[in-house]
Every structure is written in C-alpha cells, then in structure tokens.
Amino acid sequence: MKSYFYIIIVLITTCSSGFADEKKQDERLSPLIETALANNPELKSSQARWQMYTSKAKQAGTLDDPMLMFKLQNLLTREPFSIGGKDPATAKVIGISQQLPFWGKRAIKEQIASYEAESYKWAIEERKLELTRMLKETWYQIYAVDKSLEVLEKNIRIIADFVAIAESRYSVGQGVQQDIFKAGLEKSKMLDLQISLQQQRKSLVANFNYLLYRPASEQVEKIGDFEVTKISHSEEMLNKIAYEKRPQLKYLAMLSNKGVASHRLAEKEFYPDFNLSFEYMFREAAMTDPGYNMFTLGLSFNLPLQRERRQAMLAESSSESSMTLEETSALKNTIAYTISDTFAQLERRLKLVELYKKGIIPQAEQSLESAVISYRVGKVDFLTLLDGRVSLFNYERELYLSKAEYMMQLARLEATVGVDSLLISSQP
C-alpha cells in the first residue's frame, strides 16, 4: 500500500514541475511563415495580378499608334484601271495621321493606372499579414492541444494508480466500491477527452499544412513551451504605428488618389481631342496640267457635346473618392477598437498566466499533497483525493490555454497594427 502512495507523490511532483522545465521547441515558427509566404498560390496569383496592372500603367500614358494611309484619288469611272495621265484631278495619295488627346489627359491616365497597380501591391501585403496571423493562431492552438495531451497522459497514469489503490483498499475492507467506480469514471472521461484532443490536433495540423501549401499528411512535431512577456507599446503608440504601416490603409489611400485623378480626367473630358494629319499627292501631267505634286495638312477634333455623359463621369469619380474616404474612416475606427479590445484581452490572459503559475497551481499542488497525506491516515475520503487531482489537472490545462490564447491575441494585434512582431522574443 505504501508503494502506491509513493507513486502518487512522485507523479504529482512530476506534473507540477513539468510546465516549468519544458523549454525546448522542436520547430521554429518564423521559417515556416517565410515558407508559407513564398509558396502560397493565392499570393503568387496576386503578385502576378500586380505585375499585370503595373504593365498596364506603363501602357496608359502612351499615344495611340499613328495611322498610315494610301489611296487612289479621283479615278475615272469610265477607265477605272487608269491611275494617271487621263485627268489632272487623278492622284496617288499617301498620308499619316496621329490622334492627340487633350493636354494632360495622358499623364492623368498613367497616374490612374499607377494608383490602381499600387493598390494591388498593398492588397498583397495585407493578405500576407492575414496569412501570418492564421499561421500563428493555428500554431498556438496546436501548442495548447499538445500541452493538454501531455498533462492528460500524466493524469491518466495517476488515475490508473488511483483505481488500483481503490481496488486494493476495497479488497481488504478499508474502502468502498463507489471509490472504484468513481476513479474508473474519471479515467474514462479523460480517455474520452484524449480521443477528442487527438482528433482536434489532426484537424489543426491539416489546416496548418494547408496554409503552408504542403501535403496534409505532413507531420508537425510537438511544440515546446515558451514564456509570455508583456508588450512595451501603449495603445496610442500602436494606433500611430497602424496608421503608418497598415497595408489596408495604404490600399485605400491609393484608391482615394485614383478617385481624385479620375475626377481630374473627367473634367478634361469637357475639352476636345485632336487628330493631326498629313497627306502627299503624287500627280502626273495630263492635258495642259503640268501635274505638280501637292500636300494637305489637316486638324480635326471632336465636339464634346454629350455633357450628360461627362457629368456622370464626374459624379462617378466623386462617389469613388467619397466611398474610399468613408472606408478609411471606418477602418481607422475598427483599428482603434480592435487595439483597445485586444489590449484588454492580453492583459487578462497575462494576469491569468501569472495567477495560475504563481498562485492557483502551487496552492492546488499543496492541497493535493495534503489530501494524499490525510488519506493515508484516514482523515479524508477517496473522493476528496480524486477531486483534488482533477482540479489540479484542469488548472494545468487552463494555464496552457491562457498562454496559447495570449499569443493568438498578440497575433491578431500584430495583424491589426500591420507589423510582423510586437515582441523582441516570445521564446525563452
């Protein structure tokens, strides 16, 4: 009987010190994030789209190709195959013409295309932040499951010893059968939780591999422990950083600039475009006409009479600018709220981690150790001992869940601010 109590005490000590001694991480997150950003097909597609619009911007400011013209002028219907010498008006003509938009239109079109291309660039950066956030969240969810499984396996072994003790005491008439059933039930509940956690880990690993764009069967080794540290930035500082670095704000700024440029282009549409032409006529002598060659210079332009259409263009560009302005205001408001809310969540989780590590878990360990000693001398019943062990198990799980949740909230805050990391190092 004494050997059983010795095993219990040893296992309790092992469990209570496990979270403090586990420091090694088997995988590093940063290289995996770099791999995901390099291999993700959605990002590659977005980058190709950005390159496409960059090429379009280079085309937008160029002139249309000139038009080359050749014609036979004033042929005689009675002699259609005679192209010279029969009539002084007959001539062979070659000409060239060039379409010229009103002054400033080409430069504005190039600006519009450049702003649109630049907006796609910042959309890519925003997507990178989102992908990084999802990877970090999944990583720390796997960590929480790993630590829960680790604590669970230790407690299953302890509960198994509890069952053996209860059976031993019942066999000698010192215990009741209810103790055996209660210990067996707790072990079954933990085995059920173990199955659920193992399935949850497989799903998380599959999602993690999906984000990394690698086979779903790729294994992710057990994630080691780490220490959480408080960030040194204030809410005001984070808001300022977000306004400077958040790609989504830069994306909206490019759309706003595009709207302003589109408005300027719509104003230019009230002015005509021009067409310059030059024609040279080759003539031959006919009758008394010596057949001197001639040339023609021409200037033509459209009449911008469709004012209703042009007014609609102005209204469209004004609406585009107003839309992006309101979207920017809404995003800034969302950023401020998210930073404030996440700050509160981080503070809560950090306090819980400290409370569990320095308060609740040490107290629960002392209470359980006292219950074990009291149980040996018959001062407490078996159910009290079992409840103490289950409570300690739940507290240990909550510690790791709080640490994981802290890091997930931090990942959301980083994505909101628009930076890769707000900590110098979160790894011990």
Image: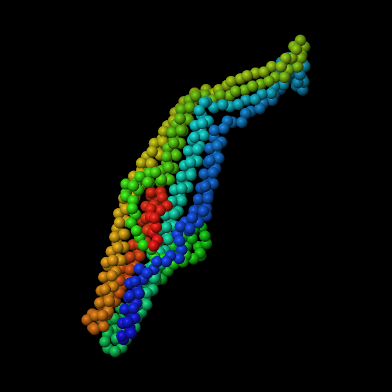
Q: Residue at x 38, y 49 (%)?
A: 417
The spot of residue 118 in percent (x, y) is 48, 41
The spot of residue 139 in percent (x, y) is 42, 61
Name above or below for residue 283 compared with residue 244: above
Tell me, yes or no, if residue 207 can be seen here: no
Toward the left, the furthest residue is 379
Location of residue 1 by image quarter: bottom left
Q: Is residue 150 left or right of residue 42?
A: left
Toward the bottom, the furthest residue is 172
The spot of residue 287 in percent (x, y) is 77, 11
Quadrant where the image shows the C terminus: bottom left
The spot of residue 30 in percent (x, y) is 46, 57
Q: Is residue 155 left or right of residue 135?
A: left
Q: Residue at x 52, y 26 (%)?
A: 102
Q: Is residue 385 left or right of residue 219?
A: left
Tell me, yes or no, if residue 105 can be seen here: yes
Q: Residue at x 56, y 36 (%)?
A: 59
Q: Residue at x 42, y 58 (%)?
A: 136
